[in-house]
Amino acid sequence: MLDVHRLRIFRSVVASGSVQAAAANLGYTPSAVSQHVAALQRETGLALLERAGRGVRPTAAGLELAAQADRVLARLGEVEAVVADLRAGRTGTLSLMYFASAGSAWLPRVVRRLTTEFPGVRLDLALGEAIPDDPDARADVQVAVASPAFVPGTGFRAHHLLDDPYVAVLPADHPLAGQPEVEIAALATERWVDNDFARGWCRRNLVEACTAAGFSPPFHVEAHDYPTAVAFVGAGIGITVLPRLGAVHLPPGLVAVPVVRPAPVRSVYAVVRDAAASTPPARAVLDELRAVARAGAAEPAAR
């Protein structure tokens, strides 16, 4: 493979008309320029320059190589510009995976910042409740729920964003709706609406809290997501218990009351791929996720 640096120097000699002029233009000594050109001639096995008075001129082979070098160096300049854009976050792709309640509560603000600051970046969004076991199947950044003992694995780092406590979503005229908090055992005789068909960590966390309070949640209706479960509560079918983040936007007529004794909490993380962590778009996403998580933690439960 030809040495690109030698091609640059040779092209400067051809353009300048002499070794001395090329050396002055490049900031090298004439000896260094001559050595690079001689090495390129050995590398190609071609005579590229010939004497012409006090200077030099390219041979026929040298002219052809100089023309080809122009195209190579121009393309290399384009590649270097792309690299500079990638380093500055002006182009490229960032993949982001998120779970449903984070998507509705946080992602609009995160995506708005990213598309405003980095309009050349393609953002690939995917909905996913679980962290894939295969590292290659993971996103550059994933907003995920995991246990406090969660270990992200080699090549990834987990950033804790929020401890998200659970709330009971009740009709506003429910006897417990005006309470500042409700013991989870006080809900044992209610008609419960399930809200997690995937039987993931969030649901297991809730079931364990109910078990600790001495009962198993009496699910009468199974819904596949938080909005549907909330709609069933609004229709008077029962109550549902879910993480606070899932109750940010409740319809009129419903309230969210924190549940206690025990108080189930889920931990939310941003899991970032090491290879993407230093890029400006990934840093901006992580920064905005932290900001929306702080803002969400400071908001009162929807009532």
Image: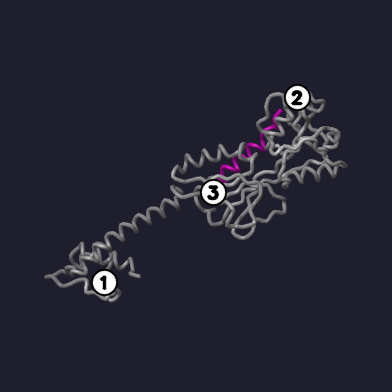
Instruction: Assign the magenta stretch its main secondary structure.
Output: helix
State the residue position of label 1: 37
Question: In terms of sequence position, does the residue under pointer 3 or pointer 2 come before the other?
Answer: 3
Residue 228, percent across and down? Answer: 69, 34
For the magenta stretch, what is the residue range? 285-303
What number is the disc on residue 95?
A: 3
Left or right: where 211 falls relative to 235: right
Is label 1 in a helix, a strand or a loop?
helix
Is label 3 in a helix, a strand or a loop?
strand
Residue 23, percent across and down? Answer: 24, 66
Looking at the image, can residue 23 be seen? no
What number is the disc on residue 72?
A: none
Q: Amino acid at mark 1?
A: Val
Whole-angstrom CA distance, mark 1 to mark 3, is 46 Å
State the residue position of label 2: 172
Residue under the image location 56 percent in, 51 percent down: 140
Q: Nearer the viewer, mark 2 or mark 1?
A: 2
Front-most of residues 10 and 74: 74
Total labels: the figure holds 3
Q: Residues within 10 Å of mark 2 (few under 14, many from 20)?
A: some
Q: Quadrant of the N terminus?
A: bottom left
Front-most of residues 23 and 91: 91
Left or right: where 90 falls relative to 47: right
Is residue 212 in the magenta section? no
Question: In terms of sequence position, does the residue under pointer 2 or pointer 1 come before the other?
Answer: 1
Front-most of residues 24 and 216: 216
Q: Amino acid at mark 2?
A: Ala
Q: Amino acid at mark 3?
A: Ser
The relative height of residue 210 versus residue 272 in the rendered view (above or below) is above
Q: Residue furthest left?
A: 53
Whole-angstrom CA distance, mark 2 to mark 1, is 85 Å
Residue under the image location 73 percent in, 38 percent down: 195
